[in-house]
Image (cartoon, rainbow, N blue to C red):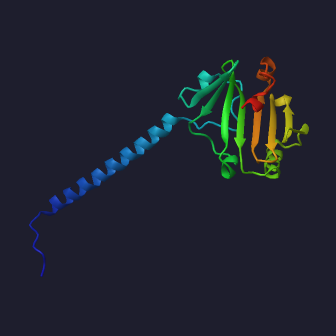
Amino acid sequence: MAENRTEEPITVFLQKERYGMKKFILVFWAIAIMFSTTAFCGEPFDTMYPPFGADIRDLNTQGYFVKYRSSGDVDYYNYIGPCKPHRIYETTAPLIVFAFAKGRLYARIIREWGRTKEVLLSSLLQGLQREPDQAYAEDGWSVYVWDFPERDFRYKLKYNDATGEAKSIRYHLPLHRELDARKNGKSLLEAW
């Protein structure tokens, strides 16, 4: 037996259209919120290749740099905002700190655990594209130093052979020359 419909076809059509319009509005607002959040966050920060020499006021417009320590003319900041993906994040969860000297980005310091010295050095040699300028042992640490005066930076790696802890620092050389990097006989890397 056929069903007896009492509703007019136009009423059924309008009810379906209202449902479709509600769905459209919901999807529209979800997309709008997603794009406005992305626009608000801005460009992800490049933690591996930060703009050395940049002023903290210019870098911290969103408040993502959080100061946690000062020592002499150097202020240490954690970065808590979105960052660009790099290979290091595929293998470890590093601690990354940024040092600002007189308000300008002076150094990026990384501490990490869990990678062997061989794996770490292989990755660095591939990225820096040359052998270190210096390699020596110091109090249980293997130390490697690369100088790039033509690119205004120095890279230093310390690896604790007993614990597997690695510390590395990338200095901005012009600020390094301006600043006395030794505080009570310790470098920034040792003090951190």
Judging depth in this view, the residue of 181 and 81 nearest the camera is: 181
Q: Quadrant of residue 14?
A: bottom left
Give me the residue at 49% from left, 39% from top.
Answer: 38
Number of marks? 0
The image quadrant where one finds the C terminus is top right
Q: Nearer the viewer, residue 54 or 16?
A: 54
Taking the spot 76% from the left edge, 47% from the top edge, the residue there is 163
Residue 109 position within the rendered picture, expressed as x and y whole percent measured from the top left? 72, 34
- Residue 134 x %, y %: 91, 37
Instruction: Determine the image quadrant of residue 144.
Output: top right
Q: Is 4 displayed left or right of 28 in the figure?
A: left
The residue lying furthest to the bottom in this view is 1
Rendered position, 73 above or below 93? above
Residue 113, position in %: x, y?
Answer: 71, 47
Q: Residue 117 in the image: x percent, y percent?
A: 81, 49
Quadrant for the N terminus in the image: bottom left
Decide if residue 49 is on the left or right side of residue 24.
Answer: right
Query: Is residue 133 left or right of 192 when viewed as pictured?
Result: right
Q: Is residue 2 above or below residue 6?
A: below
Q: Nearer the viewer, residue 36 or 102?
A: 102
Residue at screen point 80% across, 30% down: 153
57 with respect to 105 (left or right)? left
